[in-house]
Image (spheres, rainbow, N blue to C red):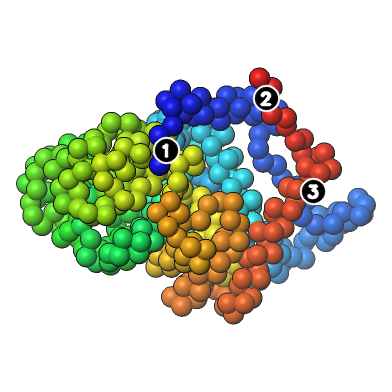
């Protein structure tokens, strides 16, 4: 891996932000609602609105499941946040969070063919947040929780998964875990190691790594061979500072770190096969000399944004054979945008009542298979977002698992599931292309230097 010049990296890193400030005012928002039905003349509103619309209303009153026939509920997702942990910006509040939620909504539509709407709630009370989300359920087919601070995010997700009549998912937890598992599956194939045998160290124990740890265990990893490091050091039974509010740390302290190691990141990496870091932005959060103490053919996922915990070329120089980051300008980007559009596509197509952990794991294995079919190597573990054909395939794996687990209202053949997902995703992409070609969406020009 060639080492880029520092000035080039900084300039490249700054450009998206500069362009965002220039272009967001051009569009004054990134999403809008457009009609889905034909409007030949204003007379058609007698069908789409009053008096005709009363008939679908009466049918839904008699049979609530008819809402999926007469409305777009089955293809709509609410992207909901309280703005308490937005990107790397922290607690910036609901107003400042809105541009991010709009961006998420675009990804839902363009990559998954899902109509998503940003909803930023002006409350930090988790119980009030939960109540509002439950009240919104009649209008949506699913809920995507986004950018909620830890540990509140765990409480909100757990309650809503139990109490909401529609599927609820937290992308910062489940989406990141899914894509990380997919990348690790293929990384282990390259180094010829098995998930149940490898020693894994997780650095940082926020929402993402908590869910990654849980998903790794469900997929077959051995908790006794897992070591977790938070901001105060290695988590173990000896730690007397673990608070009840962080119940996940207490739970994992009982089943991980069977050697009873003490110390910090350096001690936690000695002899380990895998490093999964989602902690604070680097570089130099993790040192080369620490990585050099890992096992042969080590795997290092350095996923802090916008700057990884250490530069990937430094991890390679230290002996890591495979390195992944959260950035698109380095090989092996671990990006949850590869997961959530397809997961919701598959979930909505079979009208699943929930999104189970097994559905997420099925998506991870299919995502890994998509890359394997193309040919995995040290710099290509998982597909990129440009490989749009991956999304319907992953959607099918999710839908099939939902049917198998009997959480789906509808059942289709694999062939029909693929056709449905592919058509909806193609339609979404073609809509944007047509609107741009007609000048309805203005195509911006590159900034002149």
Q: Is residue 287 above or below residue 54?
A: above
Q: Are marks 3 and 2 in contact (CB under 8 Å)?
A: no
Mark 3–mark 1 distance (CA, rounded to whole Å)? 40 Å
Q: Is residue 76 above or below residue 16?
A: below
How many residues crowd around disc 1 within 10 Å: few (fewer than 14), some, or many (20 or more)?
few
Residue of label 2: 447
Percent position (x, y) of residue 114? 62, 55
Mark 1–mark 2 distance (CA, rounded to whole Å)? 28 Å
Name the residue: 64% across, 56% down: 113
Judge whether residue 346 can be spotted in this image.
no
The outermost residue toward the top is 449
Percent position (x, y) of residue 351? 56, 68
Q: Are marks 1 and 2 in contact (CB under 8 Å)?
A: no
Of residue 233 and residue 389, the one placed in the foreground of this image is 389
How many residues crowd around disc 2 within 10 Å: few (fewer than 14), some, or many (20 or more)?
few
Residue of label 3: 434
Name the quarter where the C terminus is drawn: top right
Residue of label 1: 2
Q: Earlier in the sequence, mark 3 or mark 1?
A: 1
Residue 424 left/right relative to 410: right
Of residue 174 and residue 155, the one placed in the foreground of this image is 174
Residue 442 left/right relative to 376: right
Instruction: Report the mark closest to the observer, 1 or 2.
Output: 1
SS of the residue under disc 3: helix
């Amino acid at each position: 891996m060639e080492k880029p010049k520092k000035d080039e990296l900084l300039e490249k890193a700054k450009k998206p932000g500069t362009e965002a400030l220039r272009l967001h005012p051009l569009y004054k928002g990134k999403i809008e609602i457009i009609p889905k039905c034909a409007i030949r003349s204003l007379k058609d509103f007698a069908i789409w609105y009053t008096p005709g619309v009363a008939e679908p209303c009466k049918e839904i009153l008699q049979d609530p499941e008819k809402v999926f026939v007469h409305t777009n509920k089955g293809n709509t997702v609410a992207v909901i946040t309280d703005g308490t942990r937005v990107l790397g910006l922290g607690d910036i509040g609901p107003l400042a969070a809105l541009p991010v939620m709009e961006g998420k909504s675009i990804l839902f539509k363009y990559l998954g063919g899902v109509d998503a709407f940003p909803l930023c709630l002006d409350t930090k009370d988790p119980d009030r947040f939960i109540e509002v989300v439950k009240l919104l359920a009649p209008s949506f087919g699913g809920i995507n929780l986004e950018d909620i601070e830890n540990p509140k995010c765990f409480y909100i997700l757990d309650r809503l998964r139990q109490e909401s009549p529609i599927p609820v998912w937290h992308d910062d937890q489940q989406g990141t875990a899914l894509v990380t598992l997919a990348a690790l599956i293929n990384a282990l194939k390259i180094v010829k190691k098995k998930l149940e045998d490898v020693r894994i160290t997780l650095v940082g124990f926020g929402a993402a790594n908590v869910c990654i740890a849980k998903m790794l265990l469900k997929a077959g990893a051995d908790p006794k061979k897992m070591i977790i490091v938070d901001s105060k050091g290695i988590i173990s039974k000896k730690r007397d500072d673990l608070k009840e509010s962080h119940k996940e740390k207490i739970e994992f302290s009982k089943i991980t770190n069977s050697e009873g190691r003490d110390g910090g990141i350096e001690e936690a990496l000695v002899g380990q096969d895998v490093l999964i870091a989602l902690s604070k932005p680097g570089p130099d959060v993790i040192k080369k000399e620490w990585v050099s103490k890992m096992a042969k053919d080590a795997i290092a996922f350095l996923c802090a944004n916008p700057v990884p915990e250490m530069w990937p070329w430094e991890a390679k120089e230290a002996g890591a054979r495979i390195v992944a980051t959260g950035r698109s300008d380095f090989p092996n980007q671990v990006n949850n945008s590869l997961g959530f559009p397809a997961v919701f596509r598959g979930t909505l197509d079979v009208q699943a009542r929930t999104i189970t952990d097994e559905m997420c794991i099925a998506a991870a294995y299919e995502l890994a298979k998509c890359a394997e079919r193309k040919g995995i190597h040290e710099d290509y573990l998982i597909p990129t977002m440009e490989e749009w054909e991956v999304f319907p395939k992953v959607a099918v794996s999710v839908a099939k698992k939902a049917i198998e687990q009997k959480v789906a209202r509808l059942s289709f053949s694999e062939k029909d599931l693929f056709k449905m997902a592919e058509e909806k995703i193609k339609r979404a992409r073609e809509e944007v292309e047509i609107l741009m070609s007609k000048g309805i969406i203005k195509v911006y020009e590159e900034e002149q230097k």
